[in-house]
Amino acid sequence: MKQVRCPICDAAMPGNWQDYPDYPFCTRRCRMIDLGRWLGEDYRVAGKDATDDRSTPDEGGQEVS
Ligand SMILES: [Zn+2]
């Protein structure tokens, strides 16, 4: 049987991993840690994206004839 490990703390999950409600994390704590990382990345990217978006104004109607 394949050994499943928690991607956060790298702890082995013995027995039936399907019984773990927080799979693929071993515990809810590890799940929240991963969630926090995701949210942190998301906020950072969103703020940067908004700034970059302003640096490139959309000017349409430029026709070359
Ligand atoms: Zn863990």
Image (cartoon, helix red, strand yellow):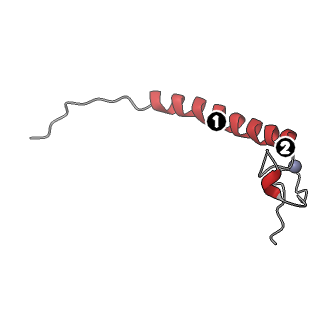
Residue designated by label 1: 42
- Nearer-the-camera pick, 43 or 32: 32
The x and y percentages for residue 3 are 84, 67
* Amino acid on which the number 1 mark rests in the picture: Asp
- Residue 46 lies in quadrant: top right
Mark 2 beta carbon near ligand 1 (under 8 Å): yes
- Nearer-the-camera pick, 32 or 26: 26
Disc 1 packing (10 Å; few <14; some 14–19; many ≥20): few
The x and y percentages for residue 61 are 19, 30
Mark 1 beta carbon near ligand 1 (under 8 Å): no
In this rendering, would 62 be left or right of 3? left
| Tag 2–tag 1 contact (CB < 8 Å) | no
Residue shown at 61% from the left, 36% from the top: 45
The numbered disc on residue 2 is none
* Amino acid on which the number 2 mark rests in the picture: Cys
The x and y percentages for residue 53 are 46, 31
Quadrant containing the N terminus is bottom right
- Residue 65 lies in quadrant: top left
Q: Residue furthest left?
A: 65
Residue designated by label 2: 30
In this rendering, would 42 be left or right of 9? left
